[in-house]
């Protein structure tokens, strides 16, 4: 469960993203977040993750949370891949033995076990992406926040792993890819007119989003 209570977010008086939003997101669903560019999709995830504070109101949730953005930020260029993954694992796993097992599993899923002792900033970008998605698939939390794609480009192996992972948590997915949202999300949230409109079916959310986009274009 994720509960937004009278949530307001603005950067300046003329740049208000959300105003007095109340919303209860139920447990165990995959929710696609739709909105125009700049509407606040990424900001919403950051606030739920605790990486950015709301201007007013509060966010409550039950259980643990993993935000895709935290995986990347936890990686230190002056640490080895293994050390970086261990640092990330320590944020979510208390038991040393289990944490080490998860580090090994991430390396194995990414297919980069032999790169464990290479500095993070020395490995190519595509390999960093594999490690990021492997970490998202392996680390178990009650809530999962994803901004963008579900896997490295054209990688069916990671897509399958990620879809399975999403079924084990409450997942919020902010993506501009209509096909991904339609295929993998149960419900939807549309950001429009400084509010969050929740729909219990992603098809309803996409239909509403297309209608308000058309209406806005007509008004302009």
Image: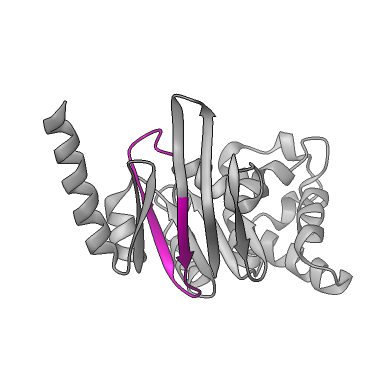
**Which sits in the foreground, 102 or 118?**
102
Q: Residue furthest left?
A: 218
Q: Is residue 150 visible?
A: no
In the rendered image, which quarter is residue 32 located in? bottom left
Q: Is residue 11 left or right of residue 181?
A: right
Q: Is residue 27 left or right of residue 131?
A: left
| 210 drawn magenta | no
Instruction: Specify the quadrant that holds the N terminus.
Output: bottom right
Q: Where is residue 85 shown, x and y percent of the image?
A: 76, 54
Give me the residue at 28% from left, 61% from top: 182
Q: Is residue 97 above or below residue 55?
A: below
Q: Is residue 207 above or below residue 63?
A: above
**Which sits in the foreground, 98 or 186?**
186
Q: Is residue 207 left or right of residue 57?
A: left
Give me the residue at 35% from left, 69% from top: 186
| 28 drawn magenta | yes
Q: Where is residue 192 shown, x and y percent of the image?
A: 32, 44
| Image color mode | one colour
Q: Is residue 89 left or right of residue 143?
A: right
**Which sits in the foreground, 22 or 102?**
22
Instruction: Specify the quadrant that holds the C terminus.
Output: top left
Q: Where is residue 131 shown, x and y percent of the image?
A: 63, 52
Q: Is residue 145 above or below residue 13?
A: below
Highlighted magenta segment, given as a residue range: 21-40
Q: Where is residue 135 shown, x and y percent of the image?
A: 64, 58
Q: Is residue 170 visible?
A: yes
């Amino acid at each position: 469960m994720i509960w937004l209570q009278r949530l307001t977010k603005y950067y300046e008086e003329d740049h208000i993203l959300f105003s007095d939003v109340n919303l209860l997101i139920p447990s165990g669903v995959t929710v696609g977040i739709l909105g125009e560019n700049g509407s606040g999709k990424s900001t919403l995830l950051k606030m739920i993750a605790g990486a950015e504070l709301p201007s007013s109101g509060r966010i409550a949730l039950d259980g643990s949370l993993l935000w895709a953005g935290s995986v990347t930020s936890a990686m230190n260029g002056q640490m080895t891949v293994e050390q970086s993954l261990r640092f990330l694992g320590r944020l979510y796993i208390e038991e040393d033995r289990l944490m080490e097992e998860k580090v090994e599993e991430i390396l194995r899923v990414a297919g980069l076990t032999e790169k464990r002792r290479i500095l993070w900033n020395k490995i190519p970008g595509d390999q960093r992406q594999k490690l990021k998605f492997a970490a998202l698939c392996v680390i178990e939390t009650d809530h999962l926040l994803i901004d963008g794609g579900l896997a490295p480009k054209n990688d069916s192996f990671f897509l399958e792993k990620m879809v399975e992972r999403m079924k084990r948590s409450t997942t919020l997915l902010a993506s501009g890819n209509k096909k991904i949202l339609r295929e993998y999300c149960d419900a939807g949230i549309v950001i429009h007119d400084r509010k969050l409109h929740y729909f219990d079916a992603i098809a309803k959310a996409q239909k509403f989003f297309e209608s308000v986009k058309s209406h806005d274009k007509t008004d302009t």
